[in-house]
Image (cartoon, grey):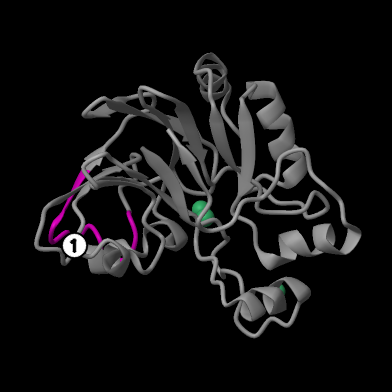
């Protein structure tokens, strides 16, 4: 099975509107667009399990494909915007969510084809032989990360978070994670209470102990000092299209 990222960026995307920094100019030259952090698992029959739905082109990208389920981390726009169009689907789409009574915009008022199911902390949902477990994270909205176990590998998709609660940290350590993808929205100098930065994220990956760790949810502001200094991080930022076999 394939686990691939549709986007790995912060809300504004790369290139950012009207930004003339070196990161954005390079993206324009390459013709790339890195949108909000969002990933999917492609099952052997071609059907899709989505991790987040902030990628605004979901309806086009998977237009004729079956979406088995969406596992939403939280109801910030950059993680659920794709549901605005997807809810008009002719098929019922199951969407697993954290315990958030507010949701986003009118998504709960007009559910259309989306069926929302709350996943309590550490609750596991099975789809065929894949298990997906909700792992609570500290963020400015109620947020779950997800640990995905297939026959071949264990993946942790952890975005967004300012810190990882101790119970979640224990669970992650026990999970023997092969691939961990973690929020590192900021450079360390930028004090923030909503997201990790590349230093705090690196410390968490070391603490959890994984086969391979990667950073996500960067903006061009995050990446600029790295490009300028040539600094190489222990765990690197990935871009849209990054994939692993699981
Ligand atoms: Zn920029
Ligand atoms: Zn968020
Ligand atoms: Zn976000």
**Residue 106 is at least partly visible in this image:** no
Q: Residue furthest top?
A: 174
Q: Residue at x 64, y 45 (%)?
A: 215
Q: Foreground residue, 80 or 28?
A: 28
Q: Find out if the beta carbon at label 1 lies less than 8 Å from the nearest ligand 3 atom.
A: no
Q: Is residue 112 magenta?
A: yes
Residue 98 on image: x %, y %: 35, 40
Q: Quadrant of residue 65?
A: bottom left
Q: Residue furthest right?
A: 229
SS assignment for the magenta stretch, majority: loop
Instruction: Look at the image and give the residue range highlighted in magenta.
Output: 103-116
Q: Foreground residue, 63 or 183?
A: 63
Q: Quadrant of the N terminus?
A: top left
Residue 37 on image: x %, y %: 50, 55
Q: Foreground residue, 158 or 76?
A: 158
Judge from the rendering whether residue 36 lies leftward or rightward of residue 45; answer left or right.
Answer: right
Q: Residue at x 60, y 70 (%)?
A: 14
* Mark 1 residue element: loop
Judge from the rendering whether residue 220 lies leftward or rightward of residue 31; answer left or right.
Answer: right
**Residue 24 is at least partly visible in this image:** yes
Residue 21 on image: x %, y %: 76, 77
Q: Is residue 130 magenta?
A: no
Q: Residue at x 25, y 27 (%)?
A: 126
Q: Quadrant of the C terminus?
A: top left
Q: Quadrant of residue 83?
A: bottom left
Compared with residue 201, is residue 58 higher up or lower down, i.e. above or below? below
Residue under label 1: 64
Judge from the rendering whether residue 151 lies leftward or rightward of residue 89; answer left or right.
Answer: right
Compared with residue 37, is residue 150 higher up or lower down, i.e. above or below? above
């Amino acid at each position: 099975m394939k686990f691939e990222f549709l986007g790995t960026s912060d809300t504004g995307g790369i290139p950012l509107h009207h930004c003339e920094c070196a990161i954005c100019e390079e993206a324009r030259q390459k013709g790339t667009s890195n949108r909000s952090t969002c990933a999917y698992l492609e099952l052997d029959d071609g059907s899709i399990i989505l991790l987040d739905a902030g990628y605004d082109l979901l309806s086009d990208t998977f237009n004729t494909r079956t979406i088995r389920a969406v596992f939403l981390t939280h109801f910030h726009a950059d993680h659920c915007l794709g549901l605005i169009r997807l809810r008009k689907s002719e098929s019922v789409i199951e969407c697993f969510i954290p315990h958030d009574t507010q949701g986003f915009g009118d998504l709960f008022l007009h559910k259309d084809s989306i069926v929302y199911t709350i996943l309590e902390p550490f609750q596991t949902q099975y789809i065929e032989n894949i298990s997906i477990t909700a792992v609570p994270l500290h963020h400015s909205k109620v947020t779950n990360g997800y640990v995905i176990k297939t026959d071949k590998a264990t993946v942790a998709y952890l975005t967004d978070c300012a810190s990882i609660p101790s119970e979640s940290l224990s669970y992650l350590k026990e999970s023997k994670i092969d691939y961990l993808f973690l929020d590192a929205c900021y450079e360390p100098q930028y004090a923030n209470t909503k997201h990790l930065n590349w230093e705090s994220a690196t410390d968490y990956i070391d603490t959890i102990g994984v086969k391979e760790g990667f950073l996500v949810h960067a903006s061009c502001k995050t990446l600029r000092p790295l490009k300028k200094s040539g600094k190489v991080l222990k765990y690197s930022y990935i871009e849209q299209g990054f994939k692993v076999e699981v």
